[in-house]
Image (cartoon, rainbow, N blue to C red):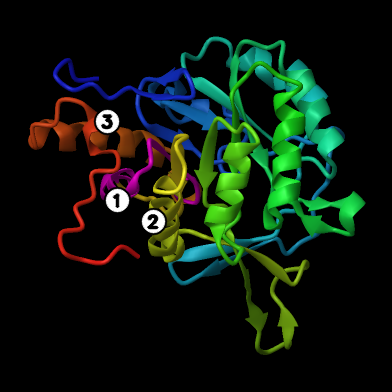
């Protein structure tokens, strides 16, 4: 890292060497990408979503390419939190990067138990709640669609861990700011947004859905302008840090999110086309700061100038 540019950022008391992380579900458990580059050069990464018991996910097809993006219906496939602790976490110890454990529960009690099991491990710097999951006690309503339920998930996790609790917000709501403020009021330490948008693709010859699940999550550059807008809105509505996600493939994309108010960013779909994408973006951000005389990347956060324009 450049001695003339401070690239480090702080989120809920945790220092990251740079503001580039990778998004849950796109970077495995981290160790898989160590064969491509030194993952210690990243600010951090988010694990695949971890559930109490292993999950097999949905049957094929699970991924469909779309213009400027992709649809996925993986179905939250993962090895479960206990196997992650026993098999994956020890392999990550040598790497000097922050590990954010993404956790998913079907009840508030499951979020609490996941938080409790991960709490003792220093290598895990924070927990990221995937509240895009359906609550089986509430008839399948998604936690992220109801401010009261979102708050309950946050409170349950916070009561079971000393680690910072981030909440990953769904864009598939009428007003994301309502969910964001509910999470903040419940004690969330940071917010990450956005998760994928619900979409659908049809095989016009077979007249059947391309995904076995019928619908899936749309990600990639196609969603970036939508995600930037939502980050802008939420960053102006809460006091806690915001982390931006959505179609970031280069430093300019990351800068949009940071200028809109994101303290850091997560790179997702780009990892599938280039496993070194996040590293390249971190390096590009540093070069940008050097070129334009920016001594501290935090100067860019929320620096959007509206002039005479009306806020969206």
Q: Nearer the viewer, mark 1 or mark 3?
A: 3
**At 66% from the left edge and 16% from the top edge, which residue is drawn?**
162
The x, y position of residue 158, in whole percent, is: 70, 26
> Would you say residue 266 sits in the magenta stretch?
yes
Q: Secondary structure at mark 2?
A: helix
Q: CA distance from mark 2 to mark 3?
A: 18 Å
**At 62% from the left edge and 31% from the top edge, which residue is drawn?**
187
The x, y position of residue 21, in whole percent, is: 45, 34
Locate the N terminus and report the quarter of the image it occupies. top left
Say if residue 48 shows up in the picture: no
Locate the C terminus and report the quarter of the image it occupies. bottom left
In the rendered structure, find residue 216 and report the number of the disc placed on it: none
Ranked by sequence position, the earlier of labels 1 and 2 is: 2
Does the CB distance between marks 2 and 3 fall below 8 Å? no
Residue under pointer 1: 256
Q: Residue furthest front?
A: 185
Residue under pointer 3: 298
Task: Establish if 61 lies above or below 232.
Answer: below
**At 29% from the left edge and 51% from the top edge, which residue is drawn?**
256
Task: Judge left or right: residue 295 versus residue 80.
Answer: left
Residue under pointer 2: 228
Q: Secondary structure at mark 1?
A: helix
Which quadrant holds residue 48?
top right
Where does the magenta region start and end?
Answer: 251-271
Ranked by sequence position, the earlier of labels 2 and 3 is: 2
- Give whichever of 42, 187 is nearer the camera: 187
Which quadrant holds residue 175?
bottom right
Does the CB distance between marks 1 and 2 fall below 8 Å? yes
């Amino acid at each position: 890292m450049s001695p003339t540019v401070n690239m480090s950022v702080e989120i809920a008391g945790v220092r990251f060497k740079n503001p580039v992380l990778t998004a849950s579900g796109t970077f495995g458990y981290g160790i898989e990408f160590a064969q491509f580059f030194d993952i210690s050069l990243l600010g951090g990464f988010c694990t695949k979503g971890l559930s109490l018991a292993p999950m097999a996910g949905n049957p094929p097809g699970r991924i469909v390419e779309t213009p400027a993006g992709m649809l996925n219906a993986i179905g939250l496939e993962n090895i479960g939190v206990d196997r992650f602790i026993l098999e994956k976490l020890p392999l990550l110890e040598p790497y000097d990067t922050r590990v954010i454990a993404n956790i998913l529960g079907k009840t508030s009690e499951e979020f609490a138990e996941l938080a409790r099991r991960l709490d003792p491990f220093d290598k895990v710097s924070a927990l990221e709640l995937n509240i895009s999951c359906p609550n089986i006690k509430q008839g399948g309503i998604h936690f992220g669609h109801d401010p009261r339920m979102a708050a309950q998930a946050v409170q349950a996790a916070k009561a079971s861990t000393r680690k910072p609790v981030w909440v990953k917000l769904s864009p598939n709501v009428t007003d994301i700011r309502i969910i964001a403020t509910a999470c903040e009021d419940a004690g969330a330490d940071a917010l990450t947004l956005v998760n994928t948008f619900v979409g659908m693709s049809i095989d016009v010859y077979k007249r059947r859905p391309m995904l076995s699940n019928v619908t899936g999550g749309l990600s990639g550059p196609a969603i970036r302008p939508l995600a930037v807008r939502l980050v802008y809105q939420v960053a102006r509505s809460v006091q806690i840090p915001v982390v931006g996600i959505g179609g970031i493939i280069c430093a300019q994309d990351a800068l949009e999110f940071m200028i809109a108010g994101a303290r850091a960013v997560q790179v997702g779909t780009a990892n599938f086309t280039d496993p070194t994408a996040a590293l390249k973006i971190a390096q590009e951000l540093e070069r940008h700061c050097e070129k334009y005389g920016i001594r501290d990347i935090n100067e860019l956060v929320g620096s959007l100038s509206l002039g005479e324009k009306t806020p969206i």
